[in-house]
Image (spheres, helix red, strand yellow):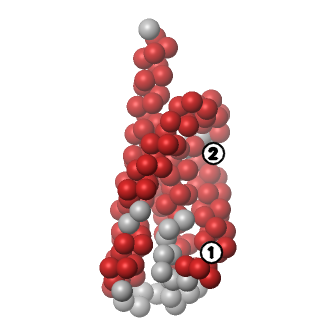
Amino acid sequence: MFFRRLLSNLVFVPCVFLIALLAAIERMFLGRFTQVFGRFGLVWALAFTVLASLLRWGTDRLLADASPFSFYYLSVVLTALVARIGSAIVAVILGGATAHFLWVEPRFTFQFLDNTQVAQLVIYVIVATLCGFAVSLARFYGALDYLNKASD
């Protein structure tokens, strides 16, 4: 049971592929968009967390309590892509609190029943933060590549 929950929250490998794809999309299409709208980082963090909550709510019958944090990784990656790492950290905190409150038994409390729930939350925070940093670094180095090409 512990390992099933542990593996359901470890989406690091798909997250890396998603980071590479989103960094390529950002480099090709979203450069100007992130310059203009990246200033509203906290709004993006809140919006993407609400979107992740709605997606998780839509799949609640399928997932039950097996994977409470799965959609919140996406909110962190999208926030880091559109805004900056500070906003992504806010998305990690909002996503962790929201997921624990809404989807972890006992629902609608911040109570922990056992150590596996604590481990799930800690793993989510670590992996989501690493994903946020990876996307921010990809954006940073993509911007440096763009500036280097523009200066040549």
State left or right for residue 137 relative to residue 35: left
Q: Is residue 70 above or below residue 80?
A: below
User: For the C terminus, which image quadrant?
Assistant: top left
Residue 140 visible in the current orientation: yes
Question: Could you tell which of marks 2 and 1 lies nearer the N-terminus?
Answer: 2
- Residue 131 pos. (x, y %): 41, 53
Marks 2,1: beta carbons within 8 A: no
Q: Quadrant of residue 51?
A: bottom right
Residue at left 62%, top 51%?
Answer: 44
145 or 96, nearer to the observer = 145
- Between label 2 and label 1, give the one nearer the viewer: 1
Q: Residues within 10 Å of mark 2 (few under 14, many from 20)?
A: some
Query: Could you say where residue 11 lies in the image, as x and y percent from the top left?
Result: 41, 62
Residue located 35% across and 62% down the image: 126
- Check disc 1: other Cα within 10 Å, few if <14, some if 14-19, many if 20+: few
Determine whether 150 is above or below 45 in the image: above
x 54%, y 65%: residue: 71
Residue named by callout 1? 59
| Residue 145 vs residue 101, the one in the foreground | 145
Q: Is residue 35 visible?
A: no
- Camera-side residue: 63 or 128? 63
Looking at the rendering, in which quadrant would you find the N terminus? bottom left
Q: Quadrant of residue 45?
A: bottom right
Under mark 1, the amino acid is Thr
Name the element at disc 2: loop
Question: Which residue has dot 2 on it?
Answer: 40
- Image: 89 above or below 139: below
**Count of marks overlaid on the render:** 2
Give amino acid for label 2. Answer: Phe
